[in-house]
Each structure stands twice: as C-alpha cells, then as structure tokens.
Image (cartoon, rainbow, N blue to C red):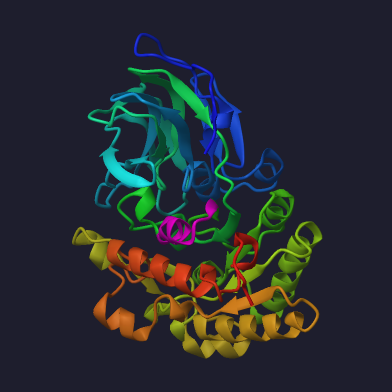
Amino acid sequence: MGILVTDLATVSGTVPISPDMVRGAVELEHTERGLLPHRLPARARAQYHDDRLAAAETQPAGVRVVFRTSATSVELDVIATKQVYPGAPPRPDGVYDLVVDGRLVGQASAESGDVVTIDMATGHGDRTEGAPETLRFDGLPGEDKEVQIWLPHNERTELVGLRADAPIAQALESGRPRWLHHGSSISQGSNAVSPTGTWLVTAAMEGAVDPVNLGFSGSALLDPFVARAMRDIPADVVSVAIGINVVNADLMRRRAFGPAVHGFLDTLRDGHPDTPLLIVSPIQCPIHEDTPGPGAFDLDALRAGTVRFRATGDPDEIRDGKLTLSIVRDELASIVAQRAVDDPRLFHLDGRELYGESDYARLPLPDELHPDAETHRLMGERFARLVFDDNGPLAMRAGRPGR
C-alpha cells in the first residue's frame, strides 16, 4: 500500500481527526467537541423520529480510524456515550480495537463520557454531558505500519484528537472491494465483545473486503430512507439481512411485507443495477420461529438481573397476517426466486446456514435473541466461506470467479 506522506501529528501536539482517516462512516458531523461518525446521512436522519434508531446510527459499528506511522505509542481522545437502563444490569464499556497490519494487538475502553438514561417503556433517553477521555496504546512495533483503531460497535463515540510519538501519515485506500450491508442489532454486533469480533467484521476480514455496516439495533424495518441511503453509497457488493426486527417489532403484516421487500430492492437497484446483491433471511431464533411478535423483555429475568427476551404474540394470529420467522423465510425465498429470473446477480442465503437449529442446541442465544461472542465468530467465518469464497455469490467483484 502506498503512503501519502503528510505529517499530521507528533507526540508534542494533538490534531483533529481528518475525515480522510475515518473509514466505514456514511457521514461525519463536526460538533462543538469533535467529529461524530454517522451511519445514515442527514437526509435520512430527517425522515424519522425514533430515539432508538437515532442512537444506533451514531454507534460506529464498522467505523475505524486508519493511518500509517512508526510510532510506538498512540493516544486517541474520545467522548463516549454510556447508556443506562434503570432496573437492568449495567452495560459493559465499549471496546476500541487496535489493529496493526491486519492483526489485533491491543484494546482499550473509555470509562467515562456522556450518559444517556433510557426509559425502557418509551425508549426516550435523557443525556448528561461528560468530558473527553484519552485512550493510550503502548508497545507498538517501531517500524512503519498501518494502524486501525476500530470504534465500539455499541457505543456512540465523538473523535476529539490524536497524538503519537512519531509522525502520522494518511493511509491510502486499501483497494479492497467495498461491502455494504444492512441488518438488525445482530448485524450491528449485539453481544459481541469488541468491534472486530462482530460476525460482520469477522466475515469482512476473512473475505478481504472493506465493510460499511448499516446494521441498526431494532431498526431493520425496510425503511425507504435506508434503501435510498444504500442506493447512493458506492459499493462493490451489497447484502441485506431481513426479518427479525420485522417480526419482533410487529409493525407489518404479511400483506405489506412482500411489497415492502420489492420496493426496498427496487430502490437498491436504482443505484446498484448490476451489483451482486444478497438477501439474507433470519438466523435461528426459537422464540419467534412460529410465534409472532411483538418481542418484549422478560421481566422476571430482569428482576433476577438477567436480560432475556420473549415473544408475546399468539400463533393463532398468523391467520390474521402476523409474521413469524418461518413465514418471513418462505416469503424472502419466493421473492428472490421470482426476481432472479430477470436479475441474475440477485442471490438468497437462508440465515440458518449461518446459525441453525443444531447450533442453537450447542450455542444457545444467551438472551434468546442475540448471538454470543463465539457465535458471532462462527457466523462470520461461515458467511465468508459461503459468500466471499471463489464460488460465493459476492465473489465476482473481488477479482474471483464467482458464479
């Protein structure tokens, strides 16, 4: 990889983060305190009024600060946002992963920052501002190297400044294919322990692609503004995971689901007419396989200090058009088969190939909804093998044969 040789910082001074050093964000907002990565553009953010999505899109899943340096010590000043749910166990601090020349060599967390206290009944949050915190990474090799600092997948982070004990140079783009993905909290990385441990980043590293992660907790709901955002983002390969939020939010009936999927895909194809496009159906999730939503917290588990989810719908409501994961999988397979007749670069992957019934028996979902760290790794490795390998549907733009 070439280097744009421009000294940006030394140990004696702090410089703002250059936008060219931030990868994986859709938009960067200059705030009074620093640089805030967004995973939806301003036009999309103006088209909803939902605190949960507003929080999720500023949690920088897949976003990393990238530069080259021979420094042995690097410091990053950040303002993290801590989420507090009264009555629920405290959330662990977000993790920052330091990757040097493709290898994870260090981790750090910000213990303080802004605090948002969230009402679990309404989803509304009250914010209290905090101060910046410095993350320090020591003991790095002294030769020239590419450094990536992956930001927490589950904790909003404002970037304030960067320091090092040797000059920092802007790294050029990797030249790898860009993978644009949209999905739910599972795609964002819920229950993974660090940003490079999410299934999506695991798959990206295994598949040698650069990810742009539009996985939003609770919010993969076939929103038109997300489809338009994806339409306008340059990408070499695109994938969309559809289903779990549609079921557990209980916002859509079978009559509306199929046309909404078609509309979402039509919009994607307006901007990516020939790009390999993969539709991923839901992974195994027993509480919603044959029971409709809405999903809810298990209050008895919460009182015992454990987060667990349950389905509150009635299987008899399927007759009235309510959706389950089984129904969603059948609908998606049918839609892709229908469209693929005229769209040969449209593909389908049954999510149970990433995590199925036998996997649940061995690695159950800890909260009945989200994979644990080991399962994220397993899903990422399987996705890379099934999708990015030479015969995978998204291999075509990666310089491999594809099918």
Percent across and percent down for residue 125 are: 45, 41
Q: Is residue 210 magenta?
A: yes
In the picture, measured across the screen, residue 237 lies left or right of residue 184, that is right
- Viewer-side residue, 34 vs 245: 34
Residue appearing at x 28%, y 65% in the figure:
374
Residue that lies at the very extreme toward the left in this rendered image: 304
Percent across and percent down for residue 218 are: 50, 59
Q: Quadrant of the C terminus?
A: bottom right
Residue appearing at x 68%, y 54% in the figure:
230
Count of numbered labels shown in the rendering: 0
Residue appearing at x 41%, y 56% in the figure:
189
Q: Is residue 403 magenta?
A: no
Residue appearing at x 46%, y 34% in the figure:
65
Q: Provide the residue span drawn in magenta.
A: 199-211
Residue that lies at the very extreme toward the top in this rendered image: 12
Percent across and percent down for residue 122 are: 47, 51
Q: Is residue 207 above or below residue 178?
A: below
Residue 265 sits in which quadrant?
Answer: bottom right
Q: Is residue 71 above or below residue 308?
A: above
